[in-house]
Image (tube, rainbow, N blue to C red):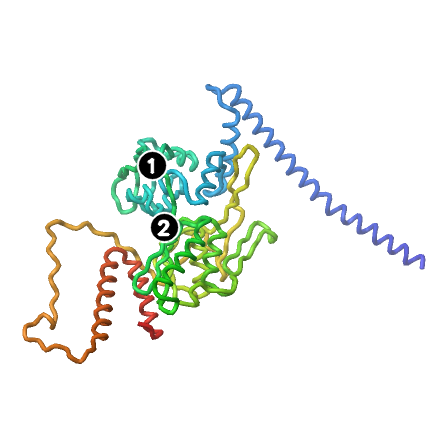
Amino acid sequence: MKKHVLAGIGGIVAGVLLATQVAGPLVAQEQERNRSVYQQLDLFGDVFERIRAQYVEEVAPEKLIEAAINGMLTSLDPHSGYLPPDDFDEMRSQTRGTFGGLGIEVTMEEGFVKVITPMDGTPAHDAGVEPGDLITHVDGESLLGMTLGQAVELMRGPVGSEIIITVVREGESEPFDLSLIRDTIRVQAVRTRTEGDIAILRVTTFNEQSYPNLRDGLQEAIEDLGGLDNLGGVVLDLRNNPGGLLSQAVRISDAFLDQGEIVSTRGRGDEGGERYNAQAGDLIDGKPIVVLINNGSASASEIVAGALQDHRRAIVVGTRSFGKGSVQTVMPLRGDGAIRLTTSLYYTPSGRSIQALGVSPDILVEQPRRAPQSEDEADTPVSRSENDLRGRLDNTSMSDDERRQLEDERRAAEEVARLRSEDYQMAYALDILRGLSALNGRR
């Protein structure tokens, strides 16, 4: 018995020795890392004090601290950054749907300010700013070398004041200037209209009003059509939508899904991930959907497009989306400012990350540039048919109702032809839905 006890004690002692031998170097490494961090912080303090004491002009300490924080964050990725109190207030105003400025969503790419998208009906949109444009100068001042925050600050100004931006655009041989008048931006999150029996939902941003606007606008369109049975389908237009609130992207996706995962987010560790699942209920009871996207569709737009695509709930049409697959968390700080920090990546239901890749459409449809019309361009020749011939035979086999239906179909076709010249991608989406409707036996 005593031998067994001694053997057990020996095992415990050996285990303690082994643990000490393994843990010792790990503890030493951690202590060395901490020592290195403290040395670097001491270095920062030394530089800070030298600037305060010896820089050619006196600098406010708080400005130095803000610049240091912002530099630390912007070195991580283009979407992390420091938000001073004024910027933090403006960001909260944007999520509520009203703010002042140009109506332009920008990012930083290789030292240049790049346009993600102009918002519908804003000064940037009206002036002809396009997704992918590079802004090189503001009122003649170069933006090269500035941080994104500094460039955005330069573009701000009093409502009603003029600003000249210099733009470099792919396909244009020379940079050119655009004049914009700053304005108060009131973003209508969702605009609804109908084309025949199809509801078009134009989602311009994802703010607190997005889902309520979509739900109410869709319900009104269905009532105007005389009920859900008369709805042929929905076009969800997400083109040039820069994104916004993740929660609103989830709710709008859920509006057309009965079950399954909508999106998942994964942070640095396994404990940082979240999954968002659809609840039962489809606002249009399984009617067909076409989602329109382009290279100005980013972030929350890509969540919606990816979710509906993966669930085979919608046909995605257009061009590849922007490819912003990261999630930023806004963390308030003491002093009324905040930091915007990239904390996770999001994944579509099939498990794909679209970071830097974007959502690829099911049907690739480019939007052709509108060619300027020449004043001396020849008039379109008048088309002729049997009905124009003198002495033709009239068709007496059709009833009045059949004639009216034929005229309605002809007017609808003419309307689509008109739309095709104005918005080719939208006309393509409507053609798909009408084809699906005809295939399913609806006229």
Q: Amino acid at mark 1?
A: Arg
Rendered residue at 62%/35% (across/down): 36
Residue that protrudes farthest toward the left in the picture: 390
Label 2 sits on a secondary structure element that is loop
Left or right of 415 on screen, residue 429: right
The percent coordinates of residue 41 (x first, y second) are 59, 31
Considering only vertical position in the picture, is 211 above or below 85? below
Q: Position of residue 371 (x, y in %)?
A: 21, 51
Q: Quadrant of residue 182?
A: top left
From the viewer's perspective, is residue 27 above or below residue 64?
below
Task: Decide which of 184, 157 is in the foreground and name it.
Answer: 184
Q: At label 2, which amino acid type do we have?
A: Asn
Q: Earlier in the sequence, mark 1 or mark 2?
A: 1
Q: Which mark is residue 240?
A: 2
Which part of the image, by quadrant, shows the N terminus?
A: bottom right
Q: Is residue 359 visible?
A: yes
Check disc 1 and report its element: helix, strand or loop: loop
The residue at the far bottom in this view is 397
Residue 210 appears at what percent x and percent y? 43, 52
Residue at the disc numbered 1: 182
Q: Residue at x 38, y 50 (%)?
A: 204
Q: Is residue 240 left or right of residue 384?
A: right
Disc number lying in front (1 or 2): 1
Residue 184 lies in quadrant: top left
